[in-house]
Image: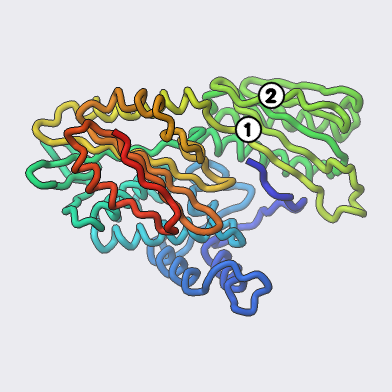
């Protein structure tokens, strides 16, 4: 995933992101704006709902200090991108789900409020809200946070003469915390570039051992201090690549004209690249240093298949104590360009009959829905797949109606 050119100035101020986003978005939603990105009705709706949801109506962020996963959740990241239509679509969806919970699923609404400082759980609860909202649209008497057979369940609803328990699973590629760790490493790089006033051309390749954890940030900071001090002192070769390593992190400096070694992300290593001012423009020519950042993230096809199978097997094991109740497993693959890559990674992997058979082999008597939620510049797009035993065909056909495509250009497929 590639990010646009970044400014040389690094923010260190403390702001109310919601207020800042509202002012910026309000200006760009004006009928007189040179490039109107969205309507003011959407902007006003998002602002009103989020202001009523967050404590004191504010979303405070300290740039340069708030860097942990708890400090920078999905809502903050979206608010930091007021000029992206995709971000507005995603914020609108979040605001609508919050409203749905407040009006119809109060226990889930309370969970969301308690999870503001736990972004992973917050997003998981939003997916539960999404499933609840969709199933209620087809008339199912859906209850979130239900207790069935003495145990808490994500959801529950009766259908004809059957009772169904719902398990919601959300999986990203890669893990959210690994993505966040690499993002913070990149933040450190940008700060170092500014601190040492480095504007010369070249590139950096970062290799982070997996599974990544919070200690990787400390390791990366120490290593970056060493590397950039040597770069600024002119102690780095200009005719060949040079490499530094510490604990979980390896950094390779590539001067202009030196070929990229071509490392790729694997199951044991994450890879990111930064291209700094490739044309080697002077500061007098370039008011900002052109920086291109690329995260080499993702799972292999085989890994995705294994993860799908494991998610289903874990869900079935989790609910092995069900009596006469049936099990509906809902798996989310939410995709936000430049922010979040869903498990299916934008692919049509489940169109492949061999893949379907391999995944379906662990479904047994459950029903599984895999839902791709893709946020595009044209709007929100759903693509839902159902995997089930033939005995549940009529049920699956009924439930899949709850996943219409808002943009009208998606595909709903029943895969038996």
Q: Name the residue under label 2.
A: 263
The quarter of the picture where residue 199 lies is top right
Residue 351, labelled with which disc?
none
The quarter of the picture where residue 92 lies is bottom left
64 sits left or right of 99 in the view: right
Question: In this view of the protein, can residue 95 be seen by the observer?
Answer: yes
Asked if residue 180 is positioned above or below residue 304 in the image, the reply reads below
Residue 296, labelled with which disc?
1
Q: Point out residue 183 in the picture as x, y percentages from the top left corner.
A: 61, 40
Residue depicted at 50% across the width and 37% down the height: 347
Q: Point out residue 393 in the picture as x, y percentages from the top left corner.
A: 21, 38
The residue carrying pointer 2 sits among few (fewer than 14), some (14 to 19) or many (20 or more) residues within 10 Å by Cα, namely some
416 sits left or right of 142 in the view: right
Residue depicted at 43% across the width and 30% down the height: 352
- Name of the residue lying farthest toward the bottom: 32
Which part of the image, by quadrant, shows the N terminus?
top right
Q: Point out residue 142 in the picture as x, y percentages from the top left corner.
A: 19, 51
Residue depicted at 89% across the width and 32% down the height: 233
Asked if residue 139 is positioned above or below residue 40 in the image, the reply reads above
Question: As rendered, which of 393 and 152 lies closer to the eye?
Answer: 393
Distance from the alpha carbon under mark 2 to that under mark 1: 9 Å
> N-terminal of the two: label 2 or label 1?
2
Question: As rendered, which of 401 and 13 lies closer to the eye?
Answer: 401
109 sits left or right of 160 in the view: right
- Pointer 2 and pointer 1: residues touching (CB < 8 Å)? yes
Check disc 2 and report its element: helix, strand or loop: loop
The residue carrying pointer 1 sits among few (fewer than 14), some (14 to 19) or many (20 or more) residues within 10 Å by Cα, namely some
Question: As rendered, which of 15 and 160 lies closer to the eye?
Answer: 160
């Amino acid at each position: 995933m590639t990010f646009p050119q970044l400014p040389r100035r690094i923010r260190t101020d403390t702001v109310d992101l919601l207020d800042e986003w509202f002012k910026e978005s309000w200006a760009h939603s004006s009928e007189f704006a040179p490039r109107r990105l969205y309507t003011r009705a959407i902007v006003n709706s998002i602002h009103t709902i989020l202001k009523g949801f967050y404590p004191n109506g504010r979303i405070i962020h300290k740039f340069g200090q708030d860097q942990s996963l708890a400090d920078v959740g999905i809502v903050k990241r979206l608010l930091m991108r007021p000029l992206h239509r995709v971000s507005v679509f995603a914020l609108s969806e979040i605001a609508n789900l919050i409203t749905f919970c407040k009006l119809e699923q109060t226990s889930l609404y309370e969970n969301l409020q308690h999870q503001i400082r736990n972004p992973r759980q917050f997003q998981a609860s939003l997916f539960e809200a999404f499933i609840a909202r969709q199933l209620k649209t087809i008339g199912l008497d859906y209850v979130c946070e239900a207790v069935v057979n003495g145990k808490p369940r994500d959801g529950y609803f009766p259908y004809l003469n059957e009772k169904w328990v719902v398990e919601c699973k959300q999986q990203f590629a890669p893990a959210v915390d690994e993505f966040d760790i690499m993002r913070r490493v990149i933040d450190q790089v940008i700060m170092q570039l500014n601190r040492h006033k480095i504007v010369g051309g070249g590139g950096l390749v970062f290799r982070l051992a997996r599974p990544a954890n919070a200690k990787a940030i400390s390791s990366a900071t120490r290593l970056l201090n060493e590397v950039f001090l040597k770069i600024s002192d002119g102690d780095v070769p200009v005719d060949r690549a040079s490499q530094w390593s510490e604990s979980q992190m390896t950094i390779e400096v590539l001067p202009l004209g030196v070929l990229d070694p071509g490392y790729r992300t694997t199951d044991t290593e994450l890879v990111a690249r930064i291209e700094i001012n490739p044309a080697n423009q002077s500061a007098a020519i370039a008011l900002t240093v052109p920086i291109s950042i690329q995260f080499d993230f993702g799972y292999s096809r085989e890994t995705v298949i294994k993860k799908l199978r494991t998610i289903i097997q874990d869900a079935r094991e989790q609910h092995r104590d069900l009596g006469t109740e049936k099990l509906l497993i809902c798996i989310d693959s939410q995709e936000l360009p430049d922010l979040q890559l869903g498990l299916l990674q934008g692919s049509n992997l489940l169109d492949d009959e061999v893949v379907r058979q391999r995944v379906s082999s662990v479904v047994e008597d459950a029903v599984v829905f895999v839902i791709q939620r893709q946020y595009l510049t044209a709007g929100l797009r759903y693509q839902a797949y159902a995997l089930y035993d033939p005995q549940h065909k009529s049920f699956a056909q009924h439930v899949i109606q709850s996943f219409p495509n808002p943009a009208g250009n998606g595909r709903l497929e029943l895969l038996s």
